[in-house]
Structures are given as structure tokens and as C-alpha cells.
Amino acid sequence: MATTLTRRVARKSASARPRNLVRDTRRKLFLEALEDRRLLAGLEGWTPEMLLDRLDIREAVYGPQPLPTPIDTASIATAWALPSSLQTLPVRRELVVVDGGVQDYQQLLNDLGRGSAARSLEIEAILIDTSVDGIEALTKVLENVRDLDAIHIVSHGGAGMLKLGNVTLTAENLDQYSAQIQAWRDSLRDGADLLLYGCDLAGNEAGRQFIGSLQELTGADVAASDDTTGDVARGNNWDLEYETGPVDTETAFSELLQQNWNGTLETRTFPAGSYVVDMGVYPQTIGNALKPYGLLYDLVTNHGIPVAWTIDSTKDDFRFSTTGAVDYVDFTAMKDTDNVPGGASVSKDYSGGPFVISGYFMTPAILTTINNWRAQGVVVDLIADSFTAEVYGDVTSFPRAVLDQQNGSIVTGYYANAGVPATSYVLGSPPNLNSCYDLYVIPHADPQSWDPSWRAALVNFIDNNQGGLWGACHSVSAYENDLITDQDMHFLSTGLLEWGDHDAGTLPYSYNPDAANDPIMQIMDNLDLATTNGSEQIYIPTATTAWRPTTTVAVYDPDHPDHEGTTLAEQAALVAYGYAYGDPTNGFIMYEAGHSHAKSSGAANIAAQRAYFNFIAFQGILH
């Protein structure tokens, strides 16, 4: 299904597209007004109510609302029709098509139309449900639309592959859809553009030929990406580097969105002979849940190959039950039943954020390494057929850490459980931080008592070297409180209560569903019990402070007796993370309450240690 969201705005129409670009529904078409703003700039008396009247909607809809009333698709033609007295205005008409499988698609839709009001730009946005034929749905919408200057398609992609709804469009099935795609011509003006934001679409010659075929069918000038589109902080971008002709359309999204949206638009096809590290095995043990990070270290450090981290961006909840964790499936593939090439195979669902070793990198030495880790409990499956999965990013390094000398030894037990060698970290202090290290780990410590030069060194590491920081126990409350005045160390909040000024939280804790597709939170059990020890077991904003808007509060206590927050930013948190000061050019920070997460081999402790190593793996994408 396609859900149509109407947003008509005034925005500057540039003569050339900037080269430095940063990257529950029903089965009928819907249309709703998103906010109270002028339909077209400079037209006195043209109000949202007039638009609603043209669309036979009874009243204006402002702010969050239930699903709008279905209307016939013919209303789209009415929506686009301008009074004859206005048809001479220099209006650009663009359609933004967003696939429902894209992470945080609402953030993308909400961003449409930001910019200056020099010339009119009229934008329509449609959301394609992941359960329907996306090509058919888009074609149906375009039947009633004319005179488009551009179509933007925001969806996952890969080399020569574009996903829309439940269709993966490639050169192999293009003939099947050629008549429908060719019909799009009727909706386009001469010289119109087609912008395809999916990752790596033009990444090889086959992909570029595929794009050429789309140009021939649509008659549009096509722009597509030849690398990963999205999260700028991870070294990606929103550039559409490959063009089949002169493309003069701006990106659909503001610079602010490009800098702060933290997803990517990559779907990748892995060849037969690839290996999947199953992170969703239940029950979770040290062998099947923590040792995989030792394998990850071995592969990226000793063999120098990238390991793909696959996460389904549509996951939106945690489902921890008494019989085990029921996680959404990240992808399905044909597992070889005896891990011998050419044998029988069976379909298997993978969850928990699996790691994939592409068959393109397989050698006898890598297979020997895989078998060594299998012997330690890691579940690694040989995949018999090619398969497609959404890739969050490629882990290309295992970050080197400085563990705070006061109590960093607490964390060395995590590394031992995972089989990650001690050479990946040192015990030290902030003056040891330099370009050789990627993050600082500070469990129970007293930064308020440090020499001021130490605090300055840590802030400089985070501010200027994009160094990461993982904090636990009362060290977090010490520097996020106002005990320190010589440096601004409110990295993730505007202030926290000092440890000892409050009680621990009340179990069970709440898990933020918006964090379910974050790499940090790829865990299969709740971690509540792992935090119930030490001098600081929960982090609480004061009555006048909050977590920064850019901080993800992933695990929290919604009814803490010392601070019952009304918004997520006010909640008492167990796990929180984000970029320091809300700036993606700074280091990435994570807090995990409790003194030690390795006091037992229980499910909660394994989950808490997984969260730590997920933070490590995420840093291995950033650095």
C-alpha cells in the first residue's frame, strides 16, 4: 500500500544539485495535511483549509493523528491541479517516494520542505508499505499525476538492485516491470530527474547498466549513489555520484537531516558460500553470545577482512519472554545442514544482529579460524544459496581502548569472556590518549578528583579526535553532574543527580522500542539484573535538566520514586548513548549503569556485556 502525505512548501529551487549532499497502514491510498503552513509561497488567502476542501477532507489535521480516512486515488489529480490563474507561477513539482523498510522514515518525511522561500517547490510524499508490490503501488499513484520535475526514491539498494515494497528490482526482473515503469513518463515533464538514494546502486558496471535501462524506460535523467548513502558520522554521504545526464534537482532533505540521520540505505546480496555468525541463538551463553566478538576481532585484526553487520531496520520492539527472547528476524537464508559445500540445505531465520562473512573473502585460512571459534561455542553457518540482507555497516577494525586505571580491570573480564586478547586494550589514564587509541573506558572512577589536565585531555580526545567513551557506575554521575566546573562534561545530558542522592530503580525496566534496531541494543535478553550492583545503578536527570534530544535513552525506569519523568528525555536511564554534545563530529558515548556486568554468567550479564561489545563493534565501523 502507499500512504500519501501531502506537504506543499516554498523552498529555493537551485539551478544545480549541490555536489556535497549528506544521505501501520492499510491497503488503500491515504492523504492527510501534515501541518499548518502556506500551500504556495506568496499567495494571499491560500490556506490548508482550502487544500482540505479540494480533497474532500472535513477538517484540518494538525499534529499526530490516527490514520486518515481513505479517499479514491482520483483525488490525487485534484490535489495537483492549480487554478488557471495560478498556472503561470514558477512552481517545481517533486514526488518523494519512501520505502517503509527505511529506518526512521518518519524523520525523513518530517524533514521535507526545510529551506528558504525564494521560489516555490511543491512536494508530495508517499510511503510504500513493505508488504506490497512497490512498483505497482507507485505506478498507480502516478496515473493521476502530471508535470513532475523530479521523483526521489528513498529505499534500500545495492549494486544494480533497488528495493521498493516487497519487490527487489534488478536487471533480471526489469522486463517484468518495464511497461509499468515506462508509464511513469506520462507523469514527468521534459528534462525531469529521477533520484535514487539506495546504497551502491551504481557501484559496479552492472549497476550502471541497470540505471541506464531505467533512463531509457522513464526518459528521465537519473542520479544514483555508487557508495553507502546515509549516516555521515560513519563516513557515508548523501552524494548521488553517478548521473546519466544533467540533473538539476536538489536533494530532498535538509543539511541538518543529512548530518543527523543515523541509518544507511544499503541492502546487499551475499554469494553462496558466505558464512553467518548466528547472534540469535537461545539460550544465550558465553560461547554463542560473547565469543562471536572474539571471532570478529580475529577476522578484522588478523585476517584484515571486513565483516558485515546485518540489522533489520524495521525492528521496533524488544520481546523478552519467560521462554526466551523473541526477536524480529533480520533475514532468512538457506543454511547448509552439515556445513559442507554441496550438501542439503534448510531455510533458517537469523536474528540478534548477525555478522556475515562474505563468500568473496573466504580462504582456507579463514575457514580454519571459523572452525577454531566454532569449537568454543560460536554458531557459524555455511549458506548454500545467495541471499539478501540489510547491512548496517562493515566492521573493519577492532578499536583499541584505554581502560581507566582506577577500576578498568572490571572490564577485562568482559574481554576474557569474549576471547578478545588483552593486546586490544591498556590500563591507563586520559594523558595516555593519542591517535593510537579509539576509546576510553571508565567504569567506577572519580573524575571529579582528577588533575584538571586529565579532564582536559579526555574532553580533547572526544572533541577533536572523535574518540569514544564508555562509562559505568558513578563515574558518569560525577562528570555529568555539576561537580566539575573547569570542563563541560555534560556529554549526553544537561545535568544528572549526584550518586548517592537517589535509590536504584524498580525492576522490571522499560525498553525503548525505537532502539530495537540500533546496533548497541542487539541483545537477546534484558540486562536489568546486571545493573543492580555498585554505587550507581541508574542515571537520573535533576528536576530542571534532561537527556539531550540527540541522546537515545534505551533502557529506563518510567516511575522512579526520585524522578518520574513525563518525557523520555526526563527518564531515569540504565542505558543511554549518542554523540557528545549532540554533535556527530564528536566522539560517540555510551553509559551502562551498574558497577560490574560480569558478576555471573547469567542471561542479564551476558546481555549487558553484549551491549558493551556492540558499542565496540559500532566503533569499529566509525574508525
Image: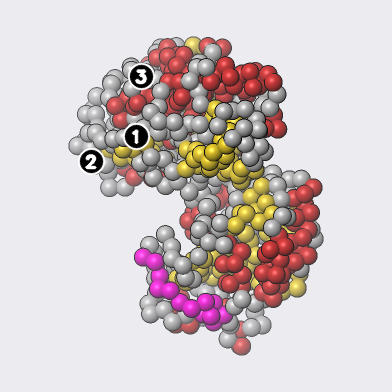
Q: CA separation, marks 2 and 3? A: 29 Å
Q: Mark 2: which amino acid?
A: Asp
Residue under label 2: 559
Q: Mark 1: which amino acid?
A: Gly
Decide which of tag 1 and tag 3 comes sooner along the chain: 1
Q: Is residue 54 left or right of residue 210?
A: left
Decide which of tag 1 and tag 2 comes sooner along the chain: 1
Q: Quadrant of the C terminus?
A: top right
Q: Is residue 576 left or right of residue 463?
A: left
Is residue 551 visible in the rendered image? The answer is yes
> Contact (CB < 8 A) between labels 1 and 3?
no
- Residue 385: mark in rendering: none
Asked if 365 appears above or below 23 in the picture, the reply is above
Q: CA separation, marks 1 and 2? A: 26 Å
What percent of the width, then of the height, locates residue 140? 58, 72
What percent of the width, then of the height, locates residue 304? 67, 23
Residue under label 1: 324
What percent of the width, then of the height, locates residue 366? 65, 21
Q: Residues within 10 Å of mark 1 (few under 14, many from 20)?
A: some
Name the foreground residue: 455 vs 605.
605
Which segment is the magenta one?
66-78
Q: Nearer the viewer, mark 1 or mark 2?
A: 1
Q: Residue furthest left?
A: 561
Q: Nearer the viewer, mark 1 or mark 3?
A: 1
Q: Mark 3: which amino acid?
A: Ser
User: Going 43% across and 20% down the picture, which residue do you hit?
Assistant: 286
Q: Main secondary structure of the magenta part?
A: loop
Decide which of tag 2 and tag 3 comes sooner along the chain: 2
User: Going 69% across and 29% down the picture, which residue do you hit?
Assistant: 361
- Residue 601: mark in rendering: 3
Please tell me whether mark 1 sits on a helix, a strand or a loop.
strand
